[in-house]
Image (cartoon, rainbow, N blue to C red):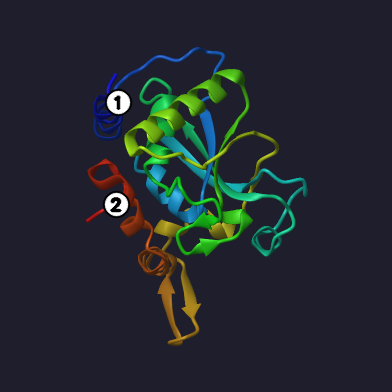
Amino acid sequence: MSTSRVFAAVLAALALGSIAQKSAADTATVTVAGGCFWCVEADFEKVQGVEEVVSGYTGGDVPDPTYREVVGGGTGHYEAARIRYDPEEITRPQLYDLFFRSIDPFDAGGQFCDRGDSYRSAIFVGSAAARADAEAAKRRAEDALGREVVTPILELGDFYRAEDYHQDYYKSDERLAVSSVGVAVPKKIAYQRYRDRCGRDARVREIWGDDAPFAGG
C-alpha cells in the first residue's frame, strides 16, 4: 500500500473510528514518549477509539520517580504516555502511524523546545507483535519522509504514573500563579501558551505538512 493510502486510512480512523479486529492476546495499550507528556495526552485523547491517556515515566531504572528527578536527569526515564484504546475502533499500527506524525522523528536530543534525555522520543513495546508493528510504522514514516527516523523502539519496562498535577493538564480549569505577571490562569491556558511558544505544531507541520493530524492551522 502506498504511503498516501496508509495515511488516508489513519486519518479515516482518527475522524470516523474505522473498525478493525485485533487478537485477544494483544494488550489494548501502547506506550510512547513524544516530548512533553501534556502534549501527547492532548493529542491522543482526541483520537476516536482512545479511551484514556495517562502521563507517566518509563525507560529508566529508578522506581517511583518524581517529575523533578526525571527532568533533572540521571534516572534514565522518559516522559511518556500510556494510551488505552478500543481495538475494535482503532488498531495499534494506526496509533503508531499517528504517533510518528505528532513528533519530530529526526531529533535525538529531545523534542521541540524541551531538551535532554527525558524529552526524547521513543516507542516502548512489550511483545514481539508490538515490536513488529512499531518497526513497520517506523519504516512507513521513513518512506514518507525520505530520511532516517531516529526514534528508537525500546523494551517496555515498568510504567510509573506521573503526579496528579500533570494528568489532564491541557484541559484543566485549575488555576496556577504565573509569577511573571502575578496573575492566576487556568492550566489549560498556560498549556496552550507553552505549546505555542515551544513551536511544536509549527515544526510538525514543517516536517509532515498536510499529514500532521494534530497540528492545527
95 relative to 166, above or below: above
Asked if residue 27 can be seen in this view, the reply is: no
* Residue 217 in sight from this viewpoint: yes
Q: Residue at x 53, y 21 (%)?
A: 132
Return the residue found at the far right.
62
Amino acid, disc 1: Val
For image coordinates 39% across by 63% down, the residue present is 195
User: Label 2: which residue?
Assistant: 205
Q: Is mark 1 on a helix, strand or loop?
A: helix
Residue identifier under label 1:
6
Query: Residue 4 at x, y = what percent?
Result: 24, 29
- Residue 6 image offset from top left, x and y in percent: 30, 26
Q: Earlier in the sequence, mark 2 or mark 1?
A: 1
Q: Quadrant of the N terminus?
A: top left
**In this view of the protein, which residue sits in the foreground, 154 or 18?**
154
Up-down: is 105 above or below 7?
below
x%, y% of residue 10?
31, 30
Q: Residues under labels 2 and 1: Cα distance?
A: 18 Å
